[in-house]
Image: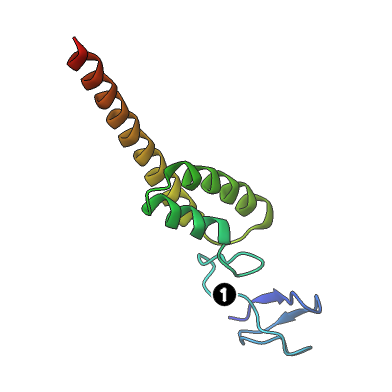
Amino acid sequence: MMASRECSRCSALTETNGAFCPNCGAPYGPTDPGVQAGPSGQTNGMAIASLVLAISCCSPLGVVFGHIAKKQIRERGDDGGGLATAGLVLGYLGLAVLAVYLLLIVGLVLFADG
């Protein structure tokens, strides 16, 4: 069964099952319709930075970069949504742990002076 495909480079509509446009030779996108790559095909750098910062104990920066990455991914169609989400989750968990730690320290200082 031949499928009708439109080339992203030359916009030619052809009936082919091949991986390349017979008109200009450009490769077609993923053959599996469930696979959706972003237009750039690149992972968003802010998403990577968000995850790295959230893991390396810079939770506030991980959260900020995660939100920026989510916005850029929505606007540009980049890959890396899962990385940005992981950075956000780990960043917020790190902030929660930091808040509990600070509350314990403040509580100990207040009760120690008695």
Task: From the viewer's perspective, tell me whether residue 53 is left or right of residue 99.
Answer: right
Q: Residue furthest top?
A: 114
Q: Position of residue 13 (x, y in %)?
A: 77, 77
Total labels drawn? 1
Q: Which residue is mark 1?
A: 30
Residue 67: image quadrant is top right
Quarter of the rendering occupied by the N terminus: bottom right
Disc 1 crowd rating (10 Å Cα; few below 14, some 14-19, many 20+) is few
Q: Is residue 47 visible?
A: yes
**Residue at image x 74%, y 74%?**
8
Q: Is residue 82 visible?
A: no
**Residue at image x 35%, y 39%?**
93
Q: Position of residue 29 (x, y in %)?
A: 62, 75
Residue 107: image quadrant is top left
Q: Is residue 57 above or below residue 16?
A: above
**Residue at image x 68%, y 57%?**
76
Q: Is residue 18 above or below residue 42?
A: below
Identify which amino acid the numbered label 1 is placed on.
Answer: Pro
Secondary structure category for the residue under label 1? loop
Q: Position of residue 74 (x, y in %)?
A: 63, 50
Task: From the viewer's perspective, tell me whether residue 112 is left or right of residue 94.
Answer: left
Q: Position of residue 36 (x, y in %)?
A: 56, 65
Work out whether residue 93 or residue 100 is closer to the camera in this orientation and state it. 100
Quarter of the rendering occupied by the C terminus: top left
